[in-house]
Image (cartoon, rainbow, N blue to C red):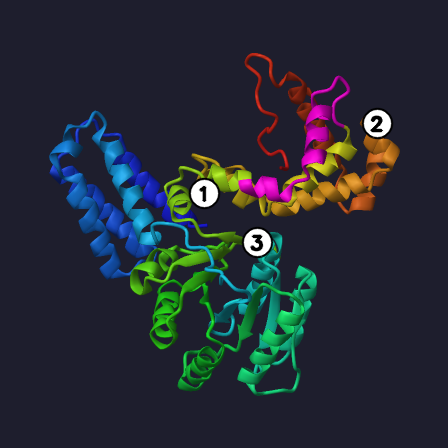
Amino acid sequence: MFDELSSKLSDTLRRLAGRGVLTEDAVKEGLREVRRVLLEADVSFDLTREFLERVQARAIGTEALKAVRPGQQVVKIVYDELVALLGEKQAPIAFASVPPTIVLLVGLQGSGKTTTAGKLAKRLKLEQKAPFLVAADVYRPAAVDQLKTVAEQAGVGVHAEPGETGVVGIVQRGIVAAGKARARTVLVDTAGRLQIDDDMMAELARLKAAVRPHEILLVADGMTGQDAVRIAGGFHEALGITGVILTKMDGDARGGAALSIYGVTKAPIKYVGVGEKLDALEPFIPERMAGRILQQGDVLTLVEKAQSSMDEEESGRLAKKALSKRGMDLEDFLSAMRQMQKMGPLKNVLGMLPGVNAKMLQQANVNEDRLKHVEAIVLSMTPRERQNPDLLNGSRRSRIARGSGRSVQEVNQLMAQFKQMKKQMKSVGKPGARMPFGRGFPG
């Protein structure tokens, strides 16, 4: 997320922070570079200019220039202003005091609206908000079937009327069905278009007037940069959106949409989609996102993700086994790898660690496919071989390579790395011990 923006902005600020004394000219020169980085990231020109004016006004002053490390103070000022640009504070869904809370999900076709409805439903289910989906896209072929599928995957109820075209009636009856199902939150998946048009907005306006939603959330493709900001402005002017969900933020998004939408519409970003799976939806917290952009890490989100994804009992068993005299076997290793995969793509997880940047991730050769290859190799072993890796002679390794579709060399490499990991695990806690994650080790 924001790989290129994060790398360039951090490099620029690192040069500023390294100066012992900052003159006014040095600050202006550094901010010119920040300006270039933000514009390349597709942040709007007006917002960039206003952002830099605020930073410069705070940075060029007596207190800043007399500080022990004035460069560090400039970094702190940029961080504070980034937080303000991103919306200042987290804006969760405003739930009604008397259920159900009605949420309209709006947006253009291709933004991932229906999948996002399923992701949001799954998250709200975990938060005990009893979500219920309503299929109100009567135009796109298979839209109703797609919503039924994601509802089933999320384990939530859904109201759909295939063949019916009266959107307002469908949603009204859906809300009644949600009440009978004792749902507390109703998520309405509305129809999108290839572009904003009068018919779409008129239909959404009628729906808004009829059901009086508590939230109108725009689902926008984070990859589209300033187009997403323009689309947000159009929906906001017509409907008064109360928030935004940015999708596809796990890709090569330049960051312009996230950094511009709040400034243009004052509608906060509430969630970001960071993957294809239904659990790949994160709350948008400006302070943490600014920390990620400046490569200061996001340890709090990482801890929360681990707590919600990992089996605490199994994690405790694995930790105890790893430090035991016998150590982990390959059954334990496979369980540990699956626990880690629940947290999402490895690149995203490592990116939350302080100081880890895109260049480091590239050098570390983080490849999600390698994890699948390792899993295939381990699963091609017999239970006895997994529990006793010393049994793996040449003929057994050849059989495992054929069974997993990998090479004997990869099997040998995995076993060598596993042996090294066990050795290092046993040394954890001793003076001078290193963590058991050698370069190139899968995971």
Up the image or down, 376 lies above or below 434; here it is: below
Q: What residue is rendered at 50% in x and 59% in y?
A: 248
Question: For this view, does 110 lie left or right of residue 54?
Answer: right
* Figure quadrant of residue 436: top right
User: Can residue 167 be seen?
Assistant: yes
What x and y, as percent, mark residue 74?
A: 24, 37
Which of disc 2 and disc 3 is earlier in sequence? 3
Q: Give the alpha-carbon distance from disc 1 to disc 2, as whole Å.
A: 38 Å
**Is residue 158 in the magenta section?**
no
Amino acid type of the residue tagged 3 in the rendering: Ala
Amino acid type of the residue tagged 1 in the rendering: Ala
Please name the residue that numbered disc 2 is placed on.
Answer: 388
Mark linked to residue 280: 3
Up the image or down, 215 lies above or below 203; here it is: above
**Is residue 320 in the magenta section?**
yes
Q: Main secondary structure of the magenta part?
A: helix
Which of disc 2 and disc 1 is earlier in sequence? 1
Please name the residue that numbered disc 1 is placed on.
Answer: 358
The secondary element bearing badge 3 is classed as loop
Q: Which residues are magenta?
A: 304-328
Whether pointer 3 and pointer 2 mark residues with C-beta atoms closer than 8 Å, the reply is no
> Outermost residue, front direction?
98
Q: What residue is rendered at 56% in x and 79% in y?
A: 172
